Image (cartoon, grey):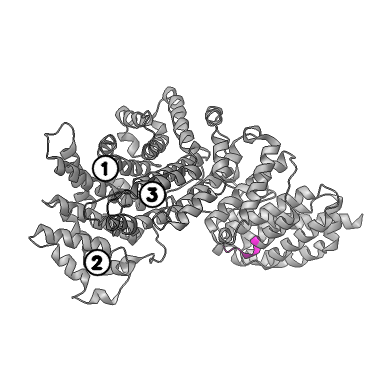
């Protein structure tokens, strides 16, 4: 049967929907107009008045949230003009300048982030971070309370800008390493008793920069681990502390190679405890509770005008913050959108309204659960495979030679990673597999309905769906790594299979969500394969099989089509061993033949053929169905076209790994035809 690769969660680069992949090279009419708003605002940055400079930065922060305005600013050297203001004598200007660059980095895409690094934005940013940290350092001389608070606000904006740049470009991570900014992030992390918002921003950034960063490991010492472990040991029950502990756990996992063998066991247990606590929280109950608490609190506001401001008005940067979250998750990712929060007294940076405390808690809860699942995905994934993106591939015979005459030396890419016995035991002891299964269910209907009706809470809908998608990806990896009994035995696996099957076609919206479809079909494919190898009866109905046939032909995403075909092959192979299944096998066979002959993608055609080999390999029912659909003559008819297409398109359109698999299928097609001819001669 076809095999799948364990997915590893990777941090995605920014690529907002609707933005050009090369925004820095766009041209717009506005950029040719010297009287354009961009030119005027950039000129105002040089004003001797701090209020004017602050106003200009705030206006730029708002303007760059619209993608069409970004080229006009970039062509006028906006980064070099705003950068020095990070060290302006006015803290308010520093804060708005950092907010403007933050929004530019979030909305401009990876090329803009690369350009910002090339234009040396990290030099004033690094200096700003160090200077601000010195202001609120407990060992520094006391400062005025208001000034100290403002310095932390500035630092929060700067940390978020640093996070954006490091998440989008490896060059920024390299600069981070060389300039020793790890100490700054640790300093900000330690502010959690005084400023949770800043600590969470720093934790997000640290989680990003520690991923696969071998150069940084030289700077990691006992003090670093001490800060992270101290956070893990906190006992505060707020959702923001849950998120902070989860992010610290992710950084510890990224840095685990710096721990001694004796320390690793204790740290893994602490990590599992943190992740288990995060996943054990029932967002379906907590989100409605938080919403009701907010409603009760806001109802006590003294004036309807104040209440209207709190409910309906949002800071100008809120759209950018939602965009930051969305693009982090598009690969997805990594994708990922871990939500971030920020605030300024001028309502110009990327934040939730200051008074929406319960909404902040709900957001932190969902971010913590999403991050927990991403960490578990990587725990259950080998570090050996390359990071290159590749489509799902299949092969019935990996012992064959590849098209170029070389054996498939990358077979380890297809092998599931079995967790070390120790980590396996730790995850089981903390009930993590069952918690992942629970999160793979649809978000609570009550929470979905509530959030869909409240404009301010509506953006949590995407975050709830992301948690489910991460859980499904996590389930795909866990199925490859855990034994059957730890997942509930035969009856438990059957129940999960039924649930996943129902999820695939639960609604018209689900069929439009490619990320969801890829996650759920990957998980179901892995589950059915395990059930088949364990001889556990499968319970896919004929109607569900036909629905998968439809998905295999209609979905634009190649990986979803491949997963659907693999599911048909696995299920059909099981049905071939049962009585009175010839009619269902006949429907399945016709669908697979149609795809093998007509799909434009050779990987999909190959998966359809591979599924046919499995379904009709053996059994009286399969032999009967094969004759009814003239399988032998159909395969003979498509064989020359498949070979010709592989020769013509192969090397120019498909990767070496895909070509190895496709060549194996070509060989197996020839063998299968010979096998069926031998059956006819009997």
Q: Secondary structure at mark 1?
A: helix
Q: CA distance from mark 3 to mark 2?
A: 41 Å
In the image, what residue occupies the spot 40% across and 48% down? 338
Q: Name which of mark 3 and mark 1 comes first in the sequence.
A: 1
- Name the residue that disc number 1 marks: 178
Farthest right residue in view: 682
Numbered range of the magenta stretch: 551-556
321 shown above or below 365? below
Left or right of 440 on screen, residue 10: left
Toward the viewer: 386 or 197? 197
Q: Quadrant of residue 223?
A: top left
Toward the viewer: 23 or 293? 293
Which numbered circle lies on residue 295? 3
The nearer-to-camera label among 3 and 1 is: 3
24 shown above or below 201? below
Which numbered circle lies on residue 73? 2
Q: Name which of mark 3 and mark 2 comes first in the sequence.
A: 2
The nearer-to-camera label among 2 and 1 is: 2
The nearer-to-camera label among 3 and 2 is: 3
């Amino acid at each position: 049967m076809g095999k799948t690769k364990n997915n590893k969660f990777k941090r995605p680069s920014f690529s907002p929907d609707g933005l050009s992949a090369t925004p820095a090279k766009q041209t717009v009419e506005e950029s040719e107009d010297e009287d354009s708003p961009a030119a005027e605002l950039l000129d105002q940055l040089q004003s001797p008045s701090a209020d004017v400079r602050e106003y200009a930065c705030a206006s730029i922060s708002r303007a760059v949230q619209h993608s069409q305005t970004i080229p006009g600013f970039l062509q006028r050297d906006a980064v070099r003009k705003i950068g020095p203001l990070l060290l302006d004598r006015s803290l308010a200007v520093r804060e708005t300048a950092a907010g403007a660059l933050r929004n530019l980095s979030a909305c401009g895409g990876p090329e803009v982030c690369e350009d910002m690094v090339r234009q040396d934005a990290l030099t004033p940013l690094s200096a700003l971070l160090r200077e601000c940290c010195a202001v609120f350092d407990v060992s520094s001389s006391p400062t005025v309370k208001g000034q100290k608070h403002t310095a932390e606000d500035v630092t929060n904006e700067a940390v978020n800008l640093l996070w954006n740049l490091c998440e989008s470009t490896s060059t920024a991570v390299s600069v981070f390493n060389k300039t020793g900014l790890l100490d700054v992030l640790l300093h900000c992390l330690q502010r959690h008793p005084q400023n949770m918002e800043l600590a969470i921003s720093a934790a997000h950034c640290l989680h990003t920069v520690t991923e696969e960063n071998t150069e940084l490991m030289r700077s990691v010492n006992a003090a670093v681990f001490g800060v992270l472990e101290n956070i893990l040991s906190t006992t505060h029950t707020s959702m923001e502390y849950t998120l902070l502990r989860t992010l610290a756990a992710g950084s510890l996992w990224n840095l685990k190679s710096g721990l001694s063998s004796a320390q690793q066991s204790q740290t893994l247990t602490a990590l599992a405890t943190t992740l288990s606590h995060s996943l054990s929280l029932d967002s379906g109950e907590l989100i409605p509770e938080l919403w009701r608490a907010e409603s009760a609190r806001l109802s006590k506001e003294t004036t309807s005008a104040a209440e209207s401001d709190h409910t309906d008005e949002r800071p100008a940067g809120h759209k950018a913050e939602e965009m930051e979250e969305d693009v982090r998750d598009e690969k997805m990712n990594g994708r990922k959108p871990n939500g971030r929060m920020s605030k300024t007294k001028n309502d110009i940076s990327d934040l939730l309204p200051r008074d929406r405390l319960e909404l902040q808690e709900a957001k932190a809860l969902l971010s913590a659960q999403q991050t927990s699942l991403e960490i578990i995905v990587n725990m259950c994934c080998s570090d050996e495979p390359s990071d290159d993106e590749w489509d799902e591939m299949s092969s019935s015979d990996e012992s064959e030679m590849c098209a170029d005459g070389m054996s498939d030396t990358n077979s380890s890419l297809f092998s599931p990673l079995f967790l070390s016995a120790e980590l396996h035991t730790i995850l089981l002891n903390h009930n993590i597999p069952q918690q992942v299964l629970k999160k793979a269910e649809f978000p609570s209907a009550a929470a979905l309905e509530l959030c869909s009706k409240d404009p301010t809470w509506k953006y949590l809908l995407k975050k709830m769906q992301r948690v489910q998608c991460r859980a499904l990806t996590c389930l795909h990896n866990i199925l490859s790594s855990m034994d059957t009994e730890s997942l509930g035995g035969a009856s438990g696996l059957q129940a999960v299979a039924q649930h996943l099957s129902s999820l695939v076609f639960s609604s018209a919206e689900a069929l439009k969500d490619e990320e969801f479809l890829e996650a759920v079909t990957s998980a179901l494919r892995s589950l059915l394969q395990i059930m088949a190898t364990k001889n556990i009866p499968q319970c896919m109905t004929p109607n569900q099989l036909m629905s998968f046939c439809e998905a295999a032909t209609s979905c634009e995403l190649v990986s979803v089509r491949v997963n659907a075909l693999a599911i048909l092959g696995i299920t059909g192979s099981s049905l071939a061993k049962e009585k009175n299944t010839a009619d269902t096998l006949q429907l399945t066979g016709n669908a697979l033949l149609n795809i093998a002959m007509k799909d434009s993608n050779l990987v999909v055609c190959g998966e359809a053929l591979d599924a046919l080999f499995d379904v009709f390999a053996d059994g009286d029912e399969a032999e009967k169905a094969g004759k009814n659909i003239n399988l032998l003559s159909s395969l003979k008819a498509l064989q020359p076209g498949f070979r010709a297409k592989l020769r013509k398109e192969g090397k120019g359109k498909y990767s070496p790994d895909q070509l190895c698999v496709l060549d194996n299928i070509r060989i197996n097609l020839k063998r299968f035809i010979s096998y069926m001819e031998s059956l006819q001669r009997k």
